[in-house]
Amino acid sequence: MIVRSRYREVLLPVAVCLATFAGRSAFGQVPPVLNTVFPTGGQVGQSVEVTVSGTNLQGLRTLHCNVPGVRCERLDPSRMRLTIPADTPPGLCDLWAVGDNGVSSPRTFAIGNRREQLETEPNETVSAAMLVPLDVVINGRLDKAGDSDHFRFEAKQGQRVIVECLAERIDSRLRAVLEIFDATGKRLAVNRGYFGIDPLIDFRVPADGFYIVKVQDLTSSGSAEHYYRLDIDTGPRVAFSVPSVIERGKASRVSLYGWNLAQASGTASAPRSSTALATTGGLTPPRSPDDLFDRLDADIPASLAEPSWPLPVRLQPSQAMLEGFAYQIPGSHAPVVIGLTDVPVTMNQDGNHSPSSAQEVIVPCEVSGQLVAGDERDWFAIPARRGEVFFIEAIGQRLQAPVDLQISVLDPSGQQELAQFGDELRNIGGGFPTSHLDPAGRWVCPADGRYLVAIRNLIGGLQADPRRTYRLSIRREEPDFQLVAVPRRDDFAGLNVRRGGREVLDLFVFRQRGCEGAIHVSAKDLPAGIECSDVWFGPGVDGTTLVVSADRNASALFGELKLEGVTEESARKSHPVRGGTIVRSGTPNGWGRITSQIPIAVAGEAPLRITADAHETLDHHLYGKLSPKHSPGGVLDVAIHIERRDTGHQAPVKMIGAGLPDSIHNQTTVIPAGQQKGYLSFHLPPTMPVGRYSLVVRAETTVPTPDKKTETVAVVSNPVTFDVQPTAILVEVDPFAVTQAKRGDTIKLSYSAKRLNGFIGKMHTELAAPGRVTDVVGLRGRGETFTGQTDKGTLQIVINDDAPLGRQQFLRLFTVGVVEDEPTYFGSSFFPLEILE
């Protein structure tokens, strides 16, 4: 069956109200962090008591699950009872801790259809191995360094027992190693990683008797966060499908590869929400080398070939672009995801392993194939015309296939390589790592003709392996994208907004096939009392910041944040924004995953609120009030207003930009104690593409606590959105200008103001600072007007005796361009002046 529509029901807004937590500092309220939920899974149609651990879980009320119908009953402050409906499809889901302090980040919870058992101690040695039956899931953990767990099961000769350990896939720190021993202690099998780093052993029982399974950590680590689920299973289990992708909305036949699939031959039912049935053909003899897998053919009707969200499997950040649906055969406890595409799908043909036997394909298409042999290379031929742009991408590692793919584009002979594409090593997410080993690239055809595309696996080795599946996409320039939102928290809590405060999410965009334009992100169906201003990714920008605000009088609540991104490219294509989370700290490359939704909570009160404005008008003594315009090479001024809940405490406020496009150099400033307004200014580089951009300002200060001490808090502003227009005036200060002067000095500042992009009018230049023109504190300068072709000049600046000492932050030259006596264009350039005694 297809596991799809039922998981969508929970995406309706949640209206669970939280009581205000009394007796605690409103300013010091800290969001909850959920470290573990144990056991980490439960059986359909049953109830399971779980124990939670973490920090700031006082007032914990419930565990929220994204699967509809899962009920939670609070037993005591750290124990909950989860009841799982009997008709719930097996798979992985998310649990969030919800309480008076807000909502935590999620932990993965597994829903299965096998019997569940808890590990019992002692079982650290073979002689103390815990006796377990077949077809059971054991929930255990290695709670101390050097710990190992042993389990003994009885099996018959010829049985195929699949022993699988879920650890990383359920947010565990365990780097599991599985071993199987016979009754004499002889090791029969070992595995250190099958699905990613989670191990699996396909154990064919050699003789009747008892066997031992050992679970240990690769580095002998252990803690409460080193938990696992151990499956010892003889039921059907699907590992992968061929093809791994089918065309959306079209009936298709797929071959499912796995173990014990004979038990599932017959028919497979569709999900309850659909009236169609997915029928399967008979079980065929395994065609894989060394009889590694069973094969079962399944017919998928067009009505089921539609994308489903969320998927009941673990998705890495790099898999955010993938669309598909979960397919489940009768009796299996684990779904398999089948990908979807909007172009025709072609199967790679046997024998296309050389340039002379290249398989002809029609663009656009996706090829689904396997590189079974270690040194295998598949060749494809495409017709192309001069100047035609192709985007070629392979998906392998993101299918959990054990491959590191490489793509080559060659001339018709296959001798001259024209382009080569390798790993995507760029990480746009920082601690939410998006890099992967799948290749992608853009190729421009040099001349009309027939060209070859070759794909190979760089880590094939000597043994054949049917799991080496791939998707090869060959398409023209058809821009597309996918967005992910990740709460920005050092403590790994969820998205919690204080009344009168703001919180931020990091937005990342995965751009595909030439998508370089601006992307607009907006919220919809917001819970009452919540605000979320629209933001824009500028052209080519892949990261920005989204700000969520709560009214000062907002009720405590728990709900869902729904976001959507739209681009002007591809006929205003839109996509819902997917959620993401950083799983745990302490890993060198970061550890994150995609989440099923983006929960939000309102709890506590904000001690400070800052408001940013990049559109403040400027008073000019010649031209009156000027509305700001921004262009490459100019300056963006952001006015900052501070509102303190406790007006009796007036500490300095540090400011810094956040969520800036990579091309903008960040700046900092300090608003002195007692002041309620300041400015943060940014130079817009001359190479910055025109378009719409967004950023925010982060502030840090101290606030009083109930015990008459102070604590440091950080808050963010509303998003600042600004349009960058083509440059009409490019102002540049002489790089050899004097940058240090004393009170009472007079300096001459040389500069240029170049007219660009068709502007030929009059220009007038003055000394300026944020919010001020000419009337700069402690400085006097007479403006200068250029007419005709003049574009260079000198300003004389007098430094008053009362001029403030030190660096004159954000001092600049400001030029106004006039068209028909109207101020139309602006240009600015910072002048780094320091005033000495």
Image: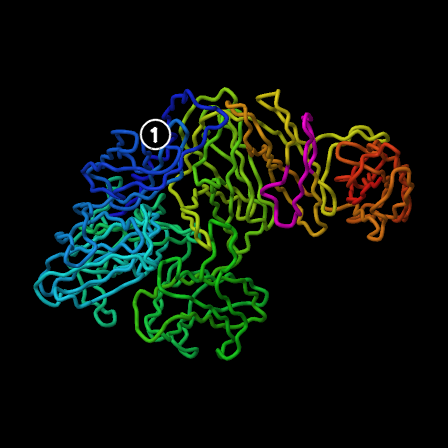
Position of residue 536 measured from the top left corner of the image (x, y, whole percent): 58, 41
Q: Look at the image and name its color scheme.
A: rainbow
Position of residue 214 measured from the top left corner of the image (x, y, whole percent): 22, 58
- Can residue 264 be seen by looking at this rendering? no
Q: Toward the viewer: 65 or 155?
A: 155
Label 1 Cα crowd, 10 Å radius (few <14 / some 14-19 / many 20+): many
In the image, 756: left or right of 520?
Answer: right
Q: Toward the viewer: 55 or 754?
A: 55
Using the image, determine if residue 87 lies above or below residue 333.
above
What segment is highlighted magenta in the picture?
Answer: 655-680
Total marks drawn? 1
Residue drawn at x 35%, y 27% as measured from the top left = 59
Q: Toward the viewer: 98 or 510?
A: 98
In the image, 497: left or right of 721?
Answer: left
- Can residue 69 be seen by looking at this rendering? yes
Residue drawn at x 26%, y 32% as measured from the top left = 71
In the image, 644: left or right of 834?
Answer: left
- Asked whether 385 falls inside the magenta stretch, the response is no
Write down the residue under mark 1: 60
Position of residue 599 measured from the top left corner of the image (x, y, whole percent): 41, 35
Q: Identify residue type, mark 1.
A: Leu
Position of residue 731 measured from the top left corner of the image (x, y, whole percent): 80, 46
Where, by quadrant of the figure, is residue 596 drawn? top left
In the image, 196: left or right of 419?
Answer: left
Using the image, determine if residue 652 lies above or below residue 574.
above
- Asked whether 669 falls inside the magenta stretch, the response is yes
Image quadrant holding the C terminus, namely top right
Residue at disc 1, secondary structure = strand
Residue drawn at x 40%, y 46% as measured from the top left = 583
Where, by quadrant of the figure, is residue 81 drawn? top left
